[in-house]
């Protein structure tokens, strides 16, 4: 997390924490004094948000650190884990409030009749919380922070719950004594909804749920626009806090491109995704000479040492094979195809060097046909 983002996140959290602390005290005190069950429930809502603010402050402090030896992808998911904790806290608070309110509805003698003070407090809370919602949401959009976005919606849920208090108290004062308790139940349901959304989204990130279909399609288009890329498969995405990580296998237009060319194309893909897709901060690109989405056709084949041993076996009686200068291997279609470089000294004294070169190539290819793992052989000659 950048220092600027961290500072603005902490500032928003401290502003919210102070507001929640003041509102929680006012609502709880006057909820008891004025006998308003819905205002009391709303006070517990603000208290829950105050606890959540503490978790957010802790998470933002811990999550600002970059990668280290124990956390090679950074600490961004501390925010995600904190979001789960916030959801659980809100869930428990909501269940407790609803249980008490429903119990009173079934026992009318226990219903509380508030005075007019909760109306003023609820109105003040609506004004404060709606302002905090707009302020925090603007920061969340600027920094693409799900934790700040969650906190913003907490402020909005507080504003809505205070509106419910306003209606409930007004209805009770008008003679509908059960309306204040119903208002407490509605506030509890609102908190439950926020708790579910917050926890579920965080859990989805923790289990590496991919980006949306629209985002993945945008990533796919960006990759295919890079010159040299023929196709792609095994495209995988995941969230890491506010960021996204991408893994992808790409097929090149030329399956026998050099290692350096393939690397250059992969780096171009990586840079394009980071530049074009806001959330993407890291990309791992795997270069494939053929489509190995299901299974590689060449996994049974040996590496260079094993291939050279087989070549020595099938070419043991060919004099030209003793002067190999370079052998380039291409693993394609279940076989090892070869580019063989020989010295032009092998053609010295030949009346028709071109015909002699072709004859050597044919001899090498025919001898290699005895080994089914060896495929096409191309021979070229270079000066020593």
Image: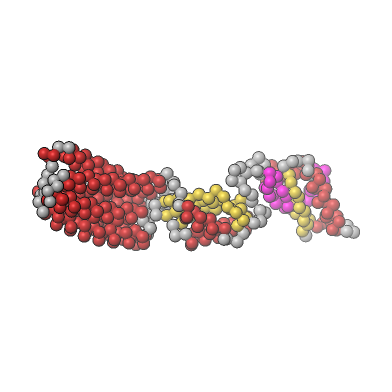
Left or right: where 12 falls relative to 238: left
Residue at x 14%, y 37% (from the top left corner)? 107
Residue at x 27%, y 55% (from the top left corner)? 156
In the rendered image, the residue lying farthest to the front is 175
Residue at x 12%, y 48% (from the top left corner)? 175
Depth check: 325 or 152 in front? 152
Left or right: where 237 falls relative to 26: right
Residue range of the region highlighted in magenta in the rendering: 316-339
Depth check: 111 or 40 in front? 111
Against 347, residue 51 (above or below) is above
Q: Is residue 61 visible?
A: no
Q: Quadrant of the C terminus?
A: bottom right
Q: Is residue 99 visible?
A: yes
In percent of width and height, residue 112 lies at: 12, 44
Figure disc tally: 0
Residue at x 80%, y 48% (from the top left corner)? 364
Against 296, residue 346 (above or below) is below
The quadrant in which residue 256 appears is bottom right
Q: Quadrant of the N terminus?
A: bottom left
In percent of width and height, residue 74 lies at: 41, 51
Q: Is residue 326 magenta?
A: yes
């Amino acid at each position: 997390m950048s220092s600027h983002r961290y500072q603005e996140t902490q500032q928003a959290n401290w502003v919210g924490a102070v507001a929640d602390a003041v509102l929680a005290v006012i609502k709880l005190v006057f909820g008891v004094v004025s006998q308003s069950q819905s205002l009391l429930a709303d006070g517990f809502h603000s208290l829950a948000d105050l606890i959540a603010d503490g978790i957010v402050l802790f998470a933002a402090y811990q999550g600002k650190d970059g990668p280290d030896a124990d956390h090679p992808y950074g600490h961004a998911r501390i925010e995600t884990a904190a979001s789960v904790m916030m959801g659980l806290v809100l869930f428990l608070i909501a269940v407790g409030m609803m249980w008490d309110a429903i119990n009173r509805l079934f026992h009318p003698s226990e219903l509380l009749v508030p005075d007019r003070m909760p109306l003023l407090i609820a109105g003040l809370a609506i004004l404060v919380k709606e302002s905090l919602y707009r302020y925090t949401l603007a920061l969340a959009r600027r920094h693409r922070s799900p934790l700040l976005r969650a906190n913003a919606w907490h402020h909005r849920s507080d504003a809505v719950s205070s509106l419910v208090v306003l209606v409930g108290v007004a209805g009770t004062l008008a003679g509908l004594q059960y309306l204040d308790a119903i208002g407490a139940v509605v506030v509890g349901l609102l908190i439950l909804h926020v708790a579910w959304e917050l926890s579920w989204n965080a859990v989805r990130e923790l289990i590496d749920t991919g980006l949306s279909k629209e985002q993945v399609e945008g990533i796919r288009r960006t990759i295919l626009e890079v010159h040299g890329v023929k196709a792609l498969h095994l495209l995988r995405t995941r969230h890491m806090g506010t960021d996204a990580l991408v893994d992808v296998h790409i097929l090149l237009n030329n399956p026998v491109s050099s290692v350096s060319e393939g690397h250059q194309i992969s780096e171009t893909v990586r840079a394009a995704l980071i530049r074009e897709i806001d959330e993407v901060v890291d990309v791992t690109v795997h270069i494939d000479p053929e489509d190995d989405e299901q299974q590689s056709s060449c996994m049974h084949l040996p590496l260079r040492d094993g291939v050279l041993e087989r070549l020595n076996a099938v070419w043991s009686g060919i004099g030209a094979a003793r002067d190999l200068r370079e052998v380039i291997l291409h693993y394609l279609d279940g076989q090892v195809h070869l580019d063989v470089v020989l010295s032009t000294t092998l053609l010295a004294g030949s009346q028709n060097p071109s015909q002699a070169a072709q004859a050597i190539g044919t001899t090498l290819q025919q001898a290699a046909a005895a080994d089914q793992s060896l495929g096409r052989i191309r021979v070229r000659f270079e000066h020593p």
